[in-house]
Amino acid sequence: MALERLQKIIAGAGIASRRKAEQLITSGKVKVNGKVIDKLGARADASKDHIKVNGKLLQPMAVPKNYFLAFKPVHVITSLSDPQGRTTIADLLRANRIRKHVFPVGRLDWDTDGLLLLTNDGELANQVMHPRAHLPKTYRVKVRGCPTDKALARLCKGITISGTKTLPARIDKARVNENSTILKVVLIEGRHHQLKIMFERIGHPVQAIRRVAIGPLALGSLQQGQIRRLTDDELMRLKKELRTREDR
């Protein structure tokens, strides 16, 4: 087997996404043939080298890939463990009697609910999260008051956050209530607290956020706290969407 980047080997073994694998490397949690590797760019041969991640030997054999959709409720941490003892995705997996080793792709804030992709396919996870993919994520956002069309157009064109302009977004009003407005927002990037910052900037603070779609994958009839396996058709459509965007 040819030499490959260490983070690609770790992701291919289903341990973590490639981005998380890079974090494991730089934090000194990966050893190759007994030597700690903490610099990115290192290569190894999974069929010959002795690779340990967090003290556990990496198994080079092919790992069956698993793909699930979860409806994360609010007050659940998008992580498999939490030192503060808060409810995590691992708790949801146990509640749904799913014993497969999978990890969340990307994240949702503690106070945000909605669709979350879970898998042990590190390569696909990397494709979904990579900035160049521009895979659209659709959100149902409740804000205080009623933003004007002019204010929403400003957000759609992009605003500057931490010195960088946000990419174009799509925003449609779904329902206007007496003291709040429900909006459908489609983003093609995922900056930290982006939606909250956007609407705070135009004077309409966010009251609730729910992610309802990731590319072609939709929340559908999934109930809060439920997890289900992706259908073959859903997985095919997701991979097709990623290929299409990669070719652009």
Image (spheres, grey):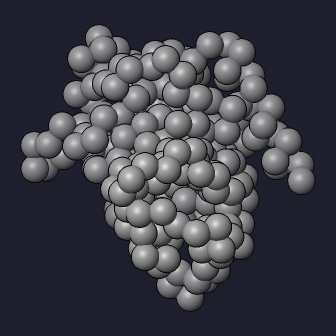
Name the spot of residue 181 as percent of width and height, x first.
46, 53
Identify whether 132 is placed above or below 74.
below
Q: Residue at x 48, y 62 (%)?
A: 146
Identify whether 141 is placed above or below 62.
below
Residue 237 left/right relative to 94: right
Hey, which residue is sitting farthest left in the picture? 85
- The number of numbered discs placed on residues in the rendered structure image is 0
Q: Nearer the viewer, residue 228 or 239?
A: 228
Identify whether 66 is placed above or below 133.
above
Residue 196: tell me if it is visible: no
Q: Nearer the viewer, residue 52 or 149?
A: 149
Hey, which residue is sitting farthest front in the picture? 178
Residue 213 left/right relative to 78: right
Name the spot of residue 123 as percent of width and height, x first.
63, 40
Q: Could you say which quadrant of the image residue 100 lies in?
A: top left
Q: Could you say which quadrant of the image residue 45 lies in?
A: top right
Q: Residue at x 53, y 81 (%)?
A: 161
Q: Residue at x 22, y 43 (%)?
A: 75
Name the spot of residue 162 as percent of width and height, x first.
50, 84
Residue 239: tell me if it is visible: yes
Q: Quadrant of the N terminus?
A: top right
Residue 145 left/right relative to 12: left
Residue 180 left/right relative to 22: left
Q: Nearer the viewer, residue 225 or 43?
A: 225
Hey, which residue is sitting farthest bottom in the picture? 163
Q: Residue at x 78, y 37 (%)?
A: 241
Name the spot of residue 201 as percent of width and height, x first.
47, 78
